[in-house]
Amino acid sequence: MSRCAIYMSCLFVIALTGCRTGTPPPADVAEKASVPVTAEETGSTTNQTAAAVNPLRDLFTEARELLGQGDTNAVLEKLEQALDAPELSDDGPAIYKAITSVMLMGGRVEETKTRLAASFKAEPDLSMSSLGGVRHYYLAQDDRDSAHAWVEQLLGLALEDRMTATLTTWQLEEYLHREDVDRVCAILTAALKSQPAERAADVVGSVLARVVKAEQADLLARILDLVEGVPDSSPRLVQQAAVYRIVLDAMRGNLPQAIDAFSGFLDAGDLASLRYLFRSLSTQAQKQGDRTAVDSLCLAVLDRQEVAAEAIQGVAVATYCGAAASPEHFAEYPTRITKLLELGVSPEMIRNPFVGQYRTIFKTGDAGLARAMIGLAERLSALVDDEQAKDTYLGLALDGYVVLDDYRKAVAMVDKGFRKADSDWQAVMVPKLRAHLAMEEGHTQEAIQHFREFMRAAAAQTPDSAALAQTLGMNAARIGDLWRGIGEADKAQAAYVEARAHYNQALKSDGHTPEQKKSIGEQLSRIASQLEAK
């Protein structure tokens, strides 16, 4: 178990048990009294041994037991002592954060604030993980004013850069909530001047993301003007401004210009920015009902595969196909797949969207559309070297021919060697396909022979399955129909009797749904009428 998991386990127990006898705090207060911390903030390492983890686990196990007894003071004493334990030297931030949470849930808010204010100045590495503790405690009680006052109090202490950047972000978050746009811009202006470039970029990035999420285009424009006005700006701030300027164009409906600017980012190779921009622009295009813009965005990537990262290409392919993944646009699907192949997109990248929509498109009942998809499945199979991938595409084609009752094409695929090495599949499916083709061509006795071969193979492979009896009943009844059709009444009656026995056996099984049992009952009624008609 990781240090983070152990620590969160401890907090979960705290949230359940409370800390003051008779007046436990609300569970959401306990939960929000802490925030997730990174390995950097806690001082924990990712390369930890079992020996390094066990002391922390043991500590929190004892703490849980003491909390269960309502002995908060004993918990705090044990955690405080653990801060000085050599074997827990790497876990100080996690222990300190647990102490903070226990104190807050015990109602010792002012004492906690005093302790933290001193620790943030004297021991930032130890206390950084508790930076949000008091704020989240107040927010859990819907006391935004107290949370904000605490943040501004800490900002007045001139803490280290990491803390100041985080606190400034929280300060701006509150002013955004209050819709105090002028105050937001004033704080950002000061941060851009006073904070180190990377920390300022952290603050700016967080605010920009929130403003975009709130769809505040005018405020976004003001902030971008501020950022772009910084002399000798850092590369990261320049990049942020460029990215969000493109997003602003999209928000304001200028999608063609935004997409052109996005294309320029492909050469830069900044995968994070490309992902964000692609997602933002496609979302805006979909909101605005502009399918042309969605296509332009996707093709901007796929037309330049030599510079576009594979991850972005994959997203573009999925989005391009997804634009035709609704019933009103299904007719476009084969055309889009063909376009991707013309662009040189790999069959592997096309496989997921193609396979994902294949059977759904067949449900439309459009034979022309179905045949187009079958043709593409066969074309894709010829473009891949991996045998499993070939079988995936050819299997879809075979399924398609069966759906269309085109057994001549289905049998031709088998004769060409489809799944030749799979003897079990061959034993069951080949006679089944040949039986249907023989029926189609009017070769009744040949069809009966193949159906019998299929039934024997199915019985051998799945002797005790719930579906077998129903399958045998259905095929025996079909054989009865075939004998009846050529005037062999006695043979037909024998087949119907056999089918009745299989269906009755199927009804005894617990493996059938009520709908399946209803269908079996209907088949038994039909067979009974055939037997009576002799």
Image: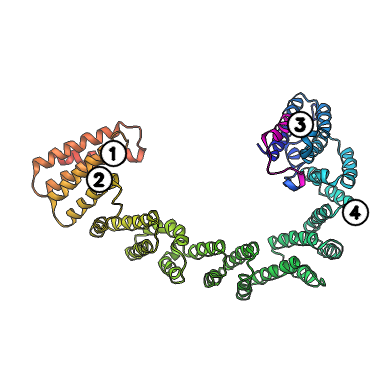
When asked about the image quadrant of residue 232, the answer is bottom right
The answer to whether the residues at label 2 and label 1 have Cβ atoms under 8 Å apart is: yes
Q: Where does the image place residue 342, in percent across and percent down from the top left?
A: 43, 72
Residue with the mark numbered 1? 461
Q: Where does the image place residue 529, in percent across and percent down from the top left?
A: 17, 40
Q: Looking at the picture, which amino acid does disc 4 mark? A: Ala
Q: From the viewer's perspective, is the residue at label 3 or at label 1 nearer?
A: 1
Q: Looking at the picture, which amino acid does disc 2 mark? A: Ala
For the residues labelled 4 and 1, the Cα–Cα distance comes to: 76 Å
Identify the magenta region. 41-60
Q: From the viewer's perspective, is the residue at label 3 or at label 4 nearer?
A: 4
Q: Is residue 99 above or below residue 401?
A: above
Q: Which residue is found at the position 24% from the left and 42% from the top?
A: 474
Residue with the mark numbered 4? 158
Q: Is residue 5 above or below residue 61?
A: below
Residue with the mark numbered 3? 18
Mark 3 lies on a secondary structure that is loop
Q: Which residue is found at the position 87% from the left and 46% from the top?
A: 120
User: How crowded is the residue under tag 4: few (<14 C-alpha within 10 Å), some, or many (20+)?
Assistant: few
Q: Where does the image place residue 295, in percent across and percent down from the top left?
A: 52, 70
Question: Tag 1 or tag 2, which sits nearer the N-term?
Answer: 2
For the residues labelled 3 and 4, the Cα–Cα distance comes to: 34 Å
Residue with the mark numbered 2? 427
